[in-house]
Image (cartoon, grey):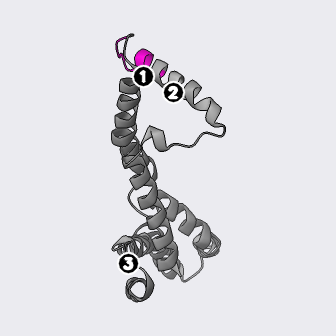
């Protein structure tokens, strides 16, 4: 199940990155086609004002610069914000701590109570922290990475790959 979820997330990210890398302004959709000249004029003004194009730049050239900007800058920003990993490490650690927190609190109370098996409790707490900070995030990351390979495969090849990677 985890491999399927990771694969779906990876495929969605790849589609978004591909869409951004191949962006063409003429292929964009407007809610109302009568708005297209207004949108093009706004983009032209943005490119002249913000990106220091000459004020007499033709609209086609400004739109071409805008396409290049989208194609080169947005995929990098997208990856930087969402990361290459299927599940970012900090989110995994937070989720795992929340899952294991009640058990960790139960075991930490035995240390405060001075029970005889405090070494067992200390060992369990170290194991808990190790599991949440290293072991499970590494497993999740590995499954996510394996599931994101060979996204072009479909059908029986994809089924075999998901089973092998998950």
Mark 1 or mark 3, which is nearer the start of the sequence? 1
Q: Is residue 88 visible?
A: no
Q: Is residue 21 above or below residue 156?
A: above
Q: Which residue bears the numbered disc 1?
A: 59
Residues tagged 2 and 1 counted as in contact (Cβ below 8 A): yes
Q: Where is residue 119 drawn, in percent x and y?
A: 48, 79
Residues tagged 3 and 1 counted as in contact (Cβ below 8 A): no
- Mark 3 vs mark 1, CA separation in Å: 41 Å
Residue in view at x 46 percent, y 54 percent: 16
Secondary structure found at label 1: helix
Mark 2 closeness class: few <14, some 14–19, many ≥20 residues within 10 Å: some
- Mark 2 vs mark 3, CA separation in Å: 38 Å
Q: Where is residue 165 drawn, in percent x and y?
A: 38, 83
State the extent of the magenta-drawn residues as a range. Answer: 46-54
Disc 3 or disc 1, which is closer to the eye? Answer: 1
- Left or right: 74 in relation to 95: left
Based on the displayed image, in which of its 4 quarters is residue 112 positioned? bottom right
Q: Which residue bears the numbered disc 2?
A: 40
Membership of 48 in magenta stretch: yes
Q: Where is residue 1 drawn, in percent x and y?
A: 53, 82
């Amino acid at each position: 199940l985890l491999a399927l979820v990771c694969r779906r997330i990876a495929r969605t990210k790849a589609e978004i990155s591909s869409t951004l890398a191949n962006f063409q302004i003429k292929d964009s959709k407007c809610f109302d086609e009568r708005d297209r000249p207004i949108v093009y004029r706004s983009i032209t003004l943005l490119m002249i004002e913000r990106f220091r194009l000459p004020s007499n730049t033709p609209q086609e050239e400004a739109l071409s610069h805008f396409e290049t900007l989208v194609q080169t800058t947005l995929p990098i920003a997208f990856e930087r914000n969402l990361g290459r990993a299927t599940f970012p490490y900090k989110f995994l650690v937070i989720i795992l701590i929340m899952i294991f927190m009640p058990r960790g609190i139960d075991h930490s109370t035995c240390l405060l109570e001075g029970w005889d098996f405090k070494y067992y409790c200390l060992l369990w707490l170290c194991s808990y922290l190790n599991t949440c900070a290293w072991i499970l995030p590494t497993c999740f990351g590995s499954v996510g990475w394996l599931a994101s390979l060979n996204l072009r495969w479909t059908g029986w090849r994809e089924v075999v790959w998901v089973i092998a990677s998950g």
